[in-house]
Image (cartoon, grey):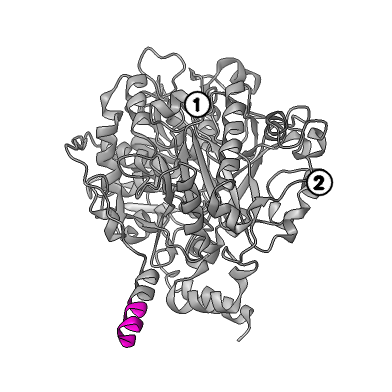
Amino acid sequence: MTSSTMALIVLAVTTLAAAGKDLTDFPRDSYDFIVVGSGSAGAVVASRLSEDAGVTVLLLEQGGDDRGIQDISVPGYARRAWLNPNISLTYSSEPMPDKYKSLKNGQTNWLRGAVLGGCSSNNNLAYQRGSKQDFDKWAETVKDDAWNYDHILSYFKRLERVTNPELKTSVYRGSDGPLSVTRSCPIYGLTDKILDALRESGIEYNEDHNGESVLGSSRTQLNTENGERVSTSKAYIHPFLGRANLDVVVHALVEKVVIANKKAVGVQMQKGGQTYIVKANREVVLSAGSLGSAQLLMLSGIGPRKHLEQLNIPVVVDSPVGQSLHDQVMFDLAMAIDKPIGTPAGVLTSTWALGEYATLKTGPLSVSDSGVVFYVGSTDEARRLAWPDLMILVSLSVSGTAAMLGSGYDDATVSGLSSRNNVTSGFTFNPTLLRPASTGSLRLRNNRTGNNFIIDPNYFAESQDVEALVEAVEICKNVLKSKTMRDLGARLVDTKPLKICESLVFDSKDYWRCVIKARPRSLNHITGTCKMGSADDVSAVVDPQLRVKGIVGLRVADASITPHVVSASTHALAVLIGEKAADIIQGKQLPPTVILKQNNASTQLCPTQQVVMVMLSIFFLLLM
């Protein structure tokens, strides 16, 4: 059987559940609640609100239906999902060739989910909560204890369904929620070797980075179950499409919020070439993401007065929308090893991998390539507070230049990285700055919907951001000095200096400062464009109840509201915000979780490891 035939079988298996409720019609002309955006937060808000049979809910999605798309459902195809134009939209920053010298036109790119489930349908599946300090600082900043860690923990526990028995016993974890969380199981020996090397380098193993502490090294945790991606669409929407009070409409492009006398009364939208106005009897909730929600506010007349006037948009509320943009920035360090214990080249299209996935939903296609993550501090202060500002994801392979499509690197930079094409076994460190001090901005190019963004990420405006990533390089280089890495022959692949940095001593701190500033990459984690703050915070767009300041009946519920960057990927945070938003709207709140004694997660072997151990036991018994 050929690999192409097997791929068709995989596709058939993953499309069995594609049939269902039609998502093209909205039978009512008014709803109690209209939720714009079906992503990591919006799907949650709509689902939770519609649990009350006494209200009607309309969920609008710009993209299409996610059912039956194998790039979404198959975890191993996560990279394909990012680059699939049918489910992902790409946006670029303003050209800054003198600043980001290794990027085409000096522009960095962002990807945004344009499908039911939003970015939860096309991200790298990582589930990361962040640190206790993130939420305690959040509560202090907005002057509302309802956002502190103890309260937030209750919502994390409610939303998640941890599938690993060794993790679900922890008092920090949830086991009955809609969103599946599974700790990745090592398929190749490289995972354990990397964890060993990290221990030898002083980075201790942490059984659960979503538990008591995020510090240290861990196997990644993913939103998967039974070998398939679990997006918020799959967890919160598909099971409840039969609710009579919930309508979900795809290919619906919302143009603006309809506001009358400073009250949100509906939305104006385009669908099938027609313009519609749908009324909201109670509230409109924007969950269109950090770019989309900010855009809709400005198109609706809520934003910086001077900017709106320049675009001939009537000003309803003068608000600092788009002025507190933060983005987690990363770069990569490719490493080659002498032993073939990582992800084999071409494995995702191999007949055996496709066959294993089609029949068992296991193997390379059932997991993400990022098998290990570790969190460390870049400064003495971060280490003293046990509040890491660096996350380093470790991919179990080295991507060649063909896979750099969408990275934004210019041709000279890609050519300079061509030595990666010759790596047959290796791994990649992906250092990420979790809490950048630099603040960017988002504006609009015109007063129309679509890709009209003027984005300035303003990376590295604060020198401490550069220094943090330089320290990340030093940490990674130190790991290479471990006995385990020496035994593997681990070494840096990119030994040819980046052309614009070649005047500097290769591998020196000055050299890495140059490289880091020249070729930044976004982790697609923009936040803060609709920043939350207290009543007296003039930099805030929404209050702690998510209400847009100056407007009645309008809230924002997605990662755009964060008052500062949380020390993790933003997906879990957005799901949390969706859960909390629904309760806030309904006038409810979970009690805080107070933990008096830590109940540590126990170590347990993965199923594949258990089988091996049982077989070895039988083998030795037969020898006796």
- The answer, for residue 477, to whether it is visible in the render is yes
Query: Residue at point 60% right, 58% down?
Result: 488
Query: Residue at point 39% right, 75% down?
Result: 612
Q: For the residues labelled 2 and 1, say whether their Cβ atoms are less than 8 Å apart.
A: no
Image label count: 2
For the N terminus, give its image quadrant: bottom right
Label 2: which residue? 411
Numbered badge on residue 193: none
Q: Position of residue 168 (x, y in %)?
A: 26, 54
Quarter where residue 228 is shown: bottom left
Query: Residue at point 51% right, 76% down?
Result: 12
Residue 362 drawn above or below residue 287 = below
Give yes or no for residue 603 being in the magenta stretch: no
Q: Nearer the viewer, residue 537 or 261?
A: 537
Q: Secondary structure at mark 2?
A: helix
Q: Nearer the viewer, residue 366 or 197?
A: 197
Q: What range of the chain is rendered magenta?
A: 614-624
**Which amino acid is tagged 1?**
Thr
Q: Position of residue 191 (x, y in %)?
A: 49, 58
Q: Dot 2: within a 10 Å radius of its alpha carbon, few (fewer than 14), some, or many (20 or more) residues?
A: few
Q: Secondary structure at mark 1?
A: loop
Label 1: which residue? 379
Q: Nearer the viewer, residue 450 or 238?
A: 238
**Which amino acid is tagged 2?**
Asp
Q: Position of residue 360 (x, y in %)?
A: 43, 76
